[in-house]
Amino acid sequence: MDVVKERGELKCGVNDNLTGFGVVMPDGSFEGFDIDYCKAIAAAILGDSSKVEYVPLTASARFTALGSGEIDVLIRNTTWTASRDRELAQDFTATTFYDGQGMMVYADSGYKTIEDMSGATVCVLQGTTTELNLDDRFTKSGIPYTPLTFETNDPLQAAFEEKRCDGWTTDKSGLASKRAEFPASAGGPDALVVLAETLSKEPLGPLTRDNDSEFYDVVQWVVFGMMQAEESGINSSNVSSMAANPKDPGMARLLGVGFDGGEVQDFQFGIPKDFMQKVISQVGNYGEVYDRHLVPLGLTREGSFNALWTDGGLIYAPPFR
């Protein structure tokens, strides 16, 4: 926390090649669901969501970059697992997106299920849980296959377009992203099908370094605050009016103001009490961020784990009290 405040900028490890989650725009700016969480943390700590240095990282380099201090926080479609939680000396905060691994094939391949893919070559990113899940699924079913591994998505996609592999496996969110932008020269989105089977549970969210509880708490409660804001009906358009006249004590606590003449509750996060006002006004609530980046990919929330808990999903914030 002290380093970020003194530097005046948050160093955020991100993906720069996954539409919807993290991508570099033609003007050099970064955009995406994960990118907005970097902005939200900067808004909370520094009061300005633009005070972020984005550090693009490959899947295999991301944990080393966080552990070495090259970045302050990693927000790069990273799955929370037991071994990572224990062995990396890094802490997962609240899950921002509940995902699951899938398999994408060409529509004319004849593949309808994983069982149809005996002898197939499958493109996969190396050093990921995806690679391990792929082997688990095929090996336990006795299905022979050949993995073709890559460090980054660009050469992987090139190999898939050249049909050097029969399937492409990653999180279904990533497959939706790549299918949506699949080039017309290779057949466009209609040339591809994502098989129905979900191979794994993939809870994705930010990571901080171990034993840095003050910074960890801020990252965690920024995420929870954005979820609670959506549940409470607070968004980037009305946050100022809600702060001026909160409807109930819980809303007042979230926005760092007093209720009905009462005192402002200080959660002692080491940042301004009204940090969530800055987050919501500059970045938005959870639903605004989701709708902005993921709904255009076809990743609708209705009926999914990423709906609010009040709508049957898993998006749920502990109480601000």
Image: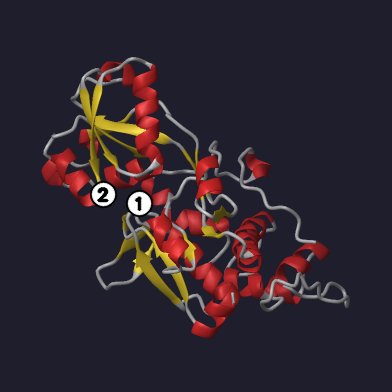
Tell me whether circle 1 and circle 2 mark residues in contact (CB < 8 Å). yes
* Comes first in the chain, label 1 or label 2: 1
**Which one is nearer the viewer's eye here, 53 or 193?**
53
What's the amino acid at mark 1? Answer: Ala
What's the amino acid at mark 2? Answer: Glu
Labelled disc at residue 59: 1
| Residue drawn at x 36%, y 58% as measured from the top left | 15
Return the residue at label 2.
151
Q: Position of residue 247 (x, y in %)?
A: 79, 65
**Which one is nearer the viewer's eye here, 289 or 273?**
273
The quadrant of the image that shows the N terminus is bottom right
Residue 191 makes an appearance in the image:
yes
| Residue drawn at x 81%, y 72% as measured from the top left | 265
Neighbour class for label 1 at 10 Å: few (<14), some, many (≥20)? Answer: many
User: Disc 2 on helix, strand or loop?
Assistant: loop
Quadrant in which residue 276 is drawn: bottom right
C-alpha span from label 1 to label 2: 7 Å
| Residue drawn at x 68%, y 52% as measured from the top left | 317
